[in-house]
Image: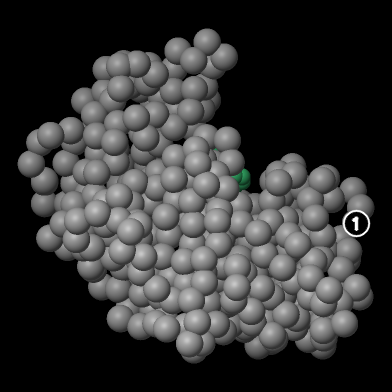
Amino acid sequence: RQTGTVETDAEKHDVEYLTPISIGTPPQDLIVDFDTGSSDLWVFSTEMAAKDIKGQAVYDPNNSSTSEKLQGSTWQITYGDGSSSSGDVYLDTVTIGNLTVPNQAVEAAKKVSDEFTDDPNNDGLLGLGFSSINTVQPTPQNTFFDNVKKNLDTPLFTTDLKHGAPGSYNFGYIDPAAYIGNISWTPVDNSQGFWGFTSPGYAVGTETLRNHSISGIADTGTTLLLLPKSIVKAYYSEVQGAQYDSSQGGYVFPCSPTPPDFVFGVNNGIVTVPGDMVLYAPIDSANQNCFGGIQSDTGIGFSIFGDVALKTSFVVFDAGGLQLGWAAK
Ligand SMILES: CSC[C@H](NC(=O)[C@H](Cc1ccccc1)OC(=O)N1CCC(N)CC1)C(=O)N[C@@H](CC1CCCCC1)[C@@H](O)COc1ccncc1
């Protein structure tokens, strides 16, 4: 039985968290975005047109003695932000930290949308959602976690994302030194392939929790905390000078004073998003006005507890118990 840990680096404004992996023999090192909101492991590859590669590292299956083409298999994925990619599939050895999966489906990109080409630091995505939403056809493939979990002490992984500092993903164990207080557990609904859960309510600042069921997903691949419009309006009604700015595509407000905290419930516990984390990023060079880290989930169909929520906590993604655990740190 094994356990593993790997460090993940926050990009500017924590817009995404990038983590090193190795693929093939000899190992080819890439840095990818671990995404609990999707279930494909895809990477930039030598099968892409040179014009679509701008600084990313690429996977070359022909340079790996252990790669084996999955004949006839293809994949195509589109994300919530409209970005997309597609290609074909190889089985090859994938290593994360000290954990190795010998026959992991590695989805080699042939095409990627501009959002990926224009993100030089990101060489691909490693999906940590449920394998039921893997896009490989004709036969969907398992995620790295699904393949490795039989070798783990216990079938779970944890996230410890931080604000502007390296965080970590641990596999197979809960590090008691990584959190304080108790872990609040809540059942997971994986019927849509996501780590879905329902929060019982929320509070703005120091007020008492309001009962308001919020169904959403814990998603490391989404930068912001996307909530129902009514809750977002209630929050920003308590932020001086906050307004919806259609040119920015969200609520903006003066970068000082620090806005109130946002609290959401997890079972009988609470998670506090400090006001200074709601200050997502300045929208002007004078740093006068800031784009909010809390925005509306309109059009998605569920809320998204993205990095703005996750980086406040130590979160346990427990596939064995089909539950999520949230703890302060
Ligand atoms: C409505 S899900 C929006 C979300 N994409 C984001 O959160 C992107 C992430 C990003 C992209 C490029 C550079 C840096 C960060 O970032 C922003 O959208 N923003 C950050 C910057 C900010 N100024 C504006 C808002 C999203 O598709 N996630 C998916 C993974 C994501 C795809 C794009 C690459 C990075 C990983 C995934 O987990 C959720 O998939 C779905 C969610 C709902 N139905 C379908 C799919």
Q: Position of residue 39 (x, y in %)?
A: 56, 71
Q: Which residue in the protein does label 1 denote?
A: 49
- Which residue is depicted at the point 24% across and 29% down? 260
Tell whether 198 sits left or right of 131: left
Q: Is residue 111 above or below residue 296?
A: below
Q: Is residue 66 visible?
A: yes
Q: Position of residue 38 (x, y in %)?
A: 54, 66
The answer to which image quadrant residue 190 occupies is bottom left
Q: Position of residue 29 (x, y in %)?
A: 75, 62
Tell whether 16 sits left or right of 294: right
- Which residue is depicted at the point 64% across and 79% down? 100
Q: Is residue 175 above or below residue 213?
A: below
Of 281 and 325, which appears nearest the observer? 325
Tell whether 186 sits left or right of 67: left
How many callouts does the rendering have?
A: 1
Mark 1: which amino acid?
Answer: Ala
Q: Is residue 200 visible?
A: no
Q: Is residue 239 above or below residue 132?
A: above
- Which residue is depicted at the point 47% across and 72% down? 171
Q: Residues within 10 Å of mark 1 (few under 14, many from 20)?
A: few
